[in-house]
Amino acid sequence: MYYIVFSIPHPLAVGSFITIFAPFVLAGCGSNDVKKTKDFITVGMYPQAMELLKKRIGENPKDAEAQFLLGSCYIHTDNLSGAGY
């Protein structure tokens, strides 16, 4: 026998979740470059993705996602020295 259990989150818990994670979600809002970059990576257009990522890192050097994606692009293009290896 299976039971289905529904849980209704407490309103304060939902508010805390939104307060904590909204800045991370909104940081990428309004930027088509993020989606475009991920689309380039998905289809293997690494040089185009790298160009956008370098621009993004130039604007925000502490952008960990952009740093990670750029490193991945370097690896996929066999440029291990660019990836930090």
Image (cartoon, rainbow, N blue to C red):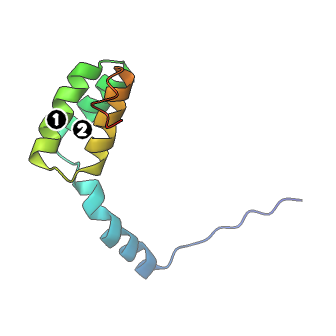
For the residue marked with disc 1, what is the amino acid? Lys
Give the number of the disc on residue 76: none
Q: Residue at x 33, y 42 (%)?
A: 68
> Could you tell which of marks 2 and 1 lies nearer the N-terminus?
2
Looking at this view, is 48 or 26 the one in front? 48
Q: Amino acid at mark 2?
A: Val
Q: Residue furthest left?
A: 59
Seen in the picture, residue 77 relative to 85 is either above or below; the reply is above
- Which residue is tagged 1? 54
Q: Quadrant of residue 73?
A: top left
Residue 40 falls in image quadrant:
top left
Q: Quadrant of residue 81?
A: top left
Residue shown at 32%/34% (left/top)?
83
The N terminus - image quarter = bottom right
51 on left or right of 74: left
Picture coordinates of residue 34 (x, y %)? Answer: 24, 38
- The residue nearer to you, when weighing 82 against 10, is 82
Residue 29: percent from the left, percent from the top? Answer: 21, 48
For the point 36% across and 20% down, the residue is: 78
Residue at 37%, 76% in the rendered image: 16
Crowding at dot 2, Cα within 10 Å, few <14 / some 14-19 / many 20+, comes out as some
Q: Is residue 10 left or right of residue 70?
A: right
Local crowd at mark 1 within 10 Å, few (<14), some, or many (≥20)? some
Quadrant of the snapshot with the C terminus = top left
Identify the mark at residue 34; answer none if there is no mark. 2
Disc 1 secondary structure class = helix
Camera-nearest residue between 23 and 64: 64
Position in image of residue 58 (x %, y %):
11, 43
Q: As drawn, is 16 to the left or to the right of 50?
A: right
- Across and down, in percent, residue 44 comes to 35, 18
- Measure the alpha-carbon separation of dots 2 and 1: 12 Å
- Local SS, label 2: helix
